[in-house]
């Protein structure tokens, strides 16, 4: 019960904070710049631990161990709960910072490049495949900007390919995950097998979750005798609150995409605002992919919910900007505050 209440407090609290303070593109632009600044000292901490093989927080008196090694590679946690969570923060925020590279202001472009480099350092130091996949997924989504009008057909084609692979493969289609090992030592087979075991034991958790999953997998975790390592955030939601919570979490992501799509289809939307919305969707896609490889249980909650909470405000701003001409209400955000021009070569297509 305490775990469930703390989850509600953290997620709902961060979302309400974002809804209250990220009310448009101007505020979201300020958030991105702040994240870029914060990413710089984080990269120094990660790099220090990677080179010295000592935990900086341990040297300062914190009760944390030194970086651990897998397959000859040091995996650095930094201030996060695990190395893959540290890399996940760098990967997802790195995708978010990409839009600064097309800012008309030189200072913003420079900050974006420095922040992006800092995120790449964080990804490298964590030595995990999951963050790399998440970052590449965000890049692929962003690269589809010129094909945004055909994204519906692209999505349908991908779904059809996955269904076809599921029918012709000997193992279920999600075992494609087991073939991914970028840095070496990745437990990719375990992530695929976890999905199979969750489906095999769905009767145990679908209603209200379960307090025991140790028998799902041949190995457990040292910090709990009752659970195996739930490295899938969607399944983690099911374990905590059953199928209703899992579906509610998926619905939140779906509605966020729905809000972005509806705003992008607004007639007369400026191209620069449409591009920012596309960047927000690309970052959300990176999160959705990353949820397949890690369960969030640290400060990454804040980053996720800040993005999801910023989407409604951005969508409402689009509606105000393209509103028919007439006297503007006093509370309307001035277009000059939200206009972030993007170079013509990016907006072509």
Image (tube, rainbow, N blue to C red):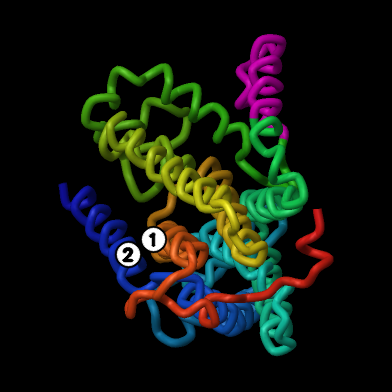
Check disc 2 and report the residue beneath it. 14
Residue at image location 61% in from the left, 40% down from the top:
187
Residue 94 percent coordinates (x, y) = 64, 66
Alpha-carbon neighbours of circle 2 within 10 Å: few (<14), some, or many (≥20)? many
Q: Magenta segment: does it hold 164? A: yes
Identify whether 267 is placed above or below 30.
Answer: above
Q: Position of residue 136 (x, y in %)?
A: 71, 52
Q: Nearer the viewer, residue 196 or 108?
A: 108
Above or below residue 181? Residue 164 is above
Residue 87 visible in the displayed image: no
Compared to residue 267, the image places residue 120 above or below, namely below
* Residue 59 pos. (x, y %): 48, 85
Query: Which residue was labeled with disc 1?
Result: 309
Left or right of 312 on screen, residue 282: right
Is label 2 or label 1 in front?
A: 1
- As drawn, the label of residue 296 is none
When asked about the image quadrant of residue 45, the answer is bottom right
| Residue 133 in sight here | yes
The main secondary structure of the magenta stretch is helix
- Residue 185 lies in magenta, yes or no? no
SS of the residue at dot 1? helix
Q: How many marks?
A: 2
Taking the view exactly as shown, the residue that stands out farthest to the left is 1
| Element type where label 2 sits in the image | helix
Q: Residue furthest front?
A: 326
Position in image of residue 38 (x %, y %): 54, 81
Residue 252 lies left or right of residue 98; in this view the side is left
Segment colored magenta: 156-179
Asked if the residue at tag 1 contacts the one at tag 2, i.e. Cβ–Cβ closer than 8 Å, the answer is yes
Judged from this view, the residue extending furthest toward the right is 345
Write the residue at 35% across / 20% down: 202
């Amino acid at each position: 019960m305490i775990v469930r209440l703390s989850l509600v407090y953290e997620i709902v609290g961060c979302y309400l904070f974002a809804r209250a303070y990220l009310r448009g593109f101007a505020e979201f632009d300020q958030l991105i710049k702040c994240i870029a600044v914060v990413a710089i000292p984080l990269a120094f901490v990660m790099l220090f631990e990677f080179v010295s093989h000592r935990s900086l927080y341990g040297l300062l008196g914190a009760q944390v161990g030194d970086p651990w090694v897998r397959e000859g590679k040091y995996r650095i946690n930094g201030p996060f709960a695990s190395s893959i969570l540290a890399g996940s923060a760098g990967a997802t925020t790195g995708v978010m910072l990409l839009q600064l590279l097309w800012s008309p202001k030189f200072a913003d472009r420079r900050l974006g490049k420095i922040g992006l480099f800092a995120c790449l350092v964080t990804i490298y130091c964590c030595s995990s495949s999951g963050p790399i996949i998440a970052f590449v997924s965000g890049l692929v989504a962003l690269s589809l900007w010129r094909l945004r009008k055909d994204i519906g057909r692209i999505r349908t084609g991908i779904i059809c390919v996955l269904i076809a692979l599921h029918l012709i493969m000997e193992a279920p289609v999600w075992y494609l995950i087991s073939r991914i090992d970028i840095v070496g030592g990745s437990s990719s087979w375990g992530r695929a097998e976890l999905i199979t075991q969750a489906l095999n034991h769905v009767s145990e958790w679908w209603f209200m979750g379960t307090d025991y999953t140790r028998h799902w997998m041949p190995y457990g975790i040292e910090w709990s005798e009752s659970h195996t390592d739930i490295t899938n955030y969607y399944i983690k939601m099911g374990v905590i609150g059953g199928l209703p919570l899992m579906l509610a979490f998926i619905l939140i992501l779906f509605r966020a995409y729905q809000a972005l799509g509806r705003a992008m289809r607004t007639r007369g939307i400026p191209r620069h605002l449409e591009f920012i919305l596309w960047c927000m969707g690309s970052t959300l896609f990176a999160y959705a992919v990353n949820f397949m490889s890690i369960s969030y249980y640290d400060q990454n909650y804040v980053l996720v919910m800040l993005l999801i909470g910023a989407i409604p405000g951005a969508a409402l701003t689009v509606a105000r900007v393209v509103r028919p001409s007439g006297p503007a209400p006093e509370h309307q955000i001035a277009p000059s505050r939200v206009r972030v021009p993007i170079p013509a070569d990016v907006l072509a297509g």
